[in-house]
Amino acid sequence: MLKAQREMLEEQANVRQDIGALHGMYRRQHEDFGRFRGNYAIDATRRNEGDIALLFSKSSAHGFNRISMRDFSQADINDFLSENYDAIDALGLRERAWNTFLKGDIIARVTEVMGNTPGFYLAVEASYTADIEDLRRAVDHAKMLRCAGDLAAYAVVAGVRKNSSVEGPLYDDVEEFIGAQDEDSALWFPLDLKDVQPDDPF
């Protein structure tokens, strides 16, 4: 009888251990899947960055169609932070903004080709499901870009969907977004689901 009870307890312990291992494996797979989806969203956003830039260049605030767009290199970012250190520091942003700016999904300058119309900066953050942290990063980066003092800077959040935490501060219309002049908001750029899927290997 005691032997049977011990065997039963050992079997239950083994089952619990197996269940725990399965939970751990599922959690790791879920985390990996989330990272993959995030990377696909960033890639899709970079493929669409010209379209994002055109939304702003064609707006009533700028009014030009032919754009030249230059993404900031790491050297550009480092130089920008050094040259505008005091102005950025005076903003009183979250300390982590200094680090997230170094690895922003898209930080770019857009100008008119062969024209004199003032251009603008873009600070774009991308996720499969956009949340409040994506918004905060984009907003922080746009505020930092404005410290250069020469051009407007716009925050953009791109994704397949957005959660409820960012419904209010995200604008769907570029004219409404620019007109609101709300430095704590961003433009929402929806990604097509098919653009964030892995390529078919066959």
Image (cartoon, helix red, strand yellow):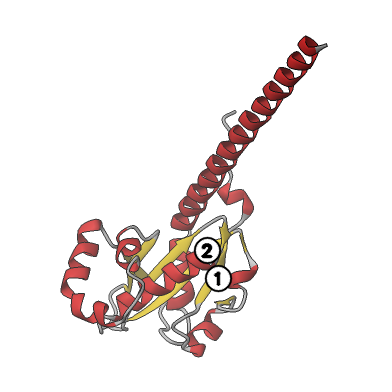
> Which residue bears the numbered disc 2?
158
The residues tagged by marks 2 and 1 sit, at their Cα atoms, a distance apart of 6 Å
Front in this rendered view, residue 88 or 147: 88
Taking the image as drawn, is residue 28 in sight?
yes
Query: Residue 202: image x %, image y %?
Result: 59, 28
Quadrant of res 77: bottom left
Quadrant of res 189: bottom right
In this view, 21 is above or below 71 = above
> Which residue bears the numbered disc 1?
188
In this view, 123 is above or below 64 = above
Residue sitting at 50 percent across and 79 percent down? 185
Q: Are marks 2 and 1 in contact (CB under 8 Å)?
A: yes
Q: Which amino acid type is shown beneath numbered disc 2?
A: Ala
Query: Residue 41: image x %, image y %?
Result: 52, 53
Front in this rendered view, residue 200 or 95: 95
Residue sitting at 61 percent across and 29 percent down? 21
Residue sitting at 49 percent across and 65 percent down? 133
Residue sitting at 38 percent across and 73 percent down? 140
Front in this rendered view, residue 122 or 117: 122
